[in-house]
Every structure is written in structure tokens, then in C-alpha cells.
Amino acid sequence: MNVIWRTLLTIWRAKVLLRRRGPIDPDSVGRVRLRTLPTDLDLLGHMNNGRYGSLFDLGRFDLLIRTGIWKVLKARGWYAVVASETITFRKSLEAWQCFTVESRLLGHDDRAVYLIHRAVVGGEVYAEMIVRARFLRRSGGIVPHEELFEALHRPDSLPPLAPWIHDWASGSALPSTRQAAPSLWE
């Protein structure tokens, strides 16, 4: 709820840009300019590590709307969920500091789409997050990528994923929801 106003503003801005400029290519870099607010800070006075994910969501909304994917998802009863994510921090964002969330689709495998989000100040990366997301049907099941690209009336032009991303995805995966996943500590 803390970022609701920024979320609504980001969605409104993305829809305006889509209307004025038309859809952007799925491999484009989306950019959302933000400022570190006092509500984003932790006790040490810099951006709370948990806040990055919420602000990177803004980049994801912007990218989904401006590529036209959002409209297709809503029309077909599909939605995206984050399956896993990893963030790496390089520098701290301080109070009132302006930064840009840069977001781009990296590619996909047979079950998920991969995105990258960056917090950037003056062209320099402060933090970076890799996200593995799935498109699901409200009626149940995963949306195959062939069906997604067909619905978008676009070819699958995303580049192949780097091998380390495949390794990360398999290494960080939890069991399927159809399997047991007991919390056992060794």
C-alpha cells in the first residue's frame, strides 16, 4: 500500500505513452524515473532492501502496458506472477535521490519469462534484479509462450537466455505446488 500512488501514476503514465506513441517492442528497455522518499528508507537512512522489489514492480507495470502485453492479458483472463527473483546491491540510494528503474525482458524458457530491473543513477547501476515470471490463466494453468506471442500478433523475437540464467532458475526452484515441501532444518 505504501507505493499505491506511485503505482497508479506509473500505470496512468504508461497508458498515456502507449496511446501517444504506440506499443514498444518486447525487447525495449522501459524507464520509470523515481525519487527515494522517506517512506522508502530503513533505519540506516538508505533505501530499504525490501522496497526495491516494490519499486521494480513499477518498471514491470510500465513495460507490460507499453508493450501491449497488459491489454492482451486482461482481455484473455491471464495474469503474471513472479516465480523467483534475485537482487544484487552495489550502491545505496539515499533520501530524496533521483533514480531510474530500467526494465527489460531477457527471454524465456518453456515455462517462464525472465526480466531484468535496474536502479540507475547517472547511467550507473546501483542495484539489479533478475525476475522469473509465469503467465497464468484465471481458469487455471500456464499460458504457453506460443499462445502469448500469437495473441500479441508478434513473433518471438526475444534473445536466447544466457546459460547462467538457466542454472539460476533450476538452482533456486522450489518443488511444484503438487508436491510436498516440508520445512525441515538440518
Image: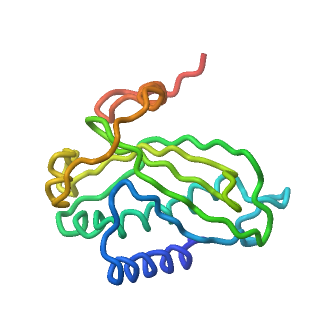
Q: Quadrant of residue 180?
A: top left
Measured along the vertical axis of the image, is residue 183 above or below residue 100? above
Measured along the vertical axis of the image, is residue 97 above or below residue 112? below
Asked if residue 185 lies left or right of residue 137, the reply is right
Asked if residue 7 lies left or right of residue 159, the reply is right
Pick the residue in front: 73 or 50.
73
Residue 9: image location, x then y, percent = 50, 80
Residue 101: image location, x then y, percent = 58, 62
Residue 168: image location, x then y, percent = 48, 29
Asked if residue 154 lies left or right of residue 37, the reply is left
Residue shown at 29% from the left, 58% from the top: 79
Measured along the vertical axis of the image, is residue 102 above or below residue 178? below
Q: Quadrant of residue 102?
A: bottom right
Quadrant housing the N terminus = bottom right
Residue shown at 74% from the left, 59% from the top: 47
Asked if residue 166 lies left or right of residue 67, the reply is right
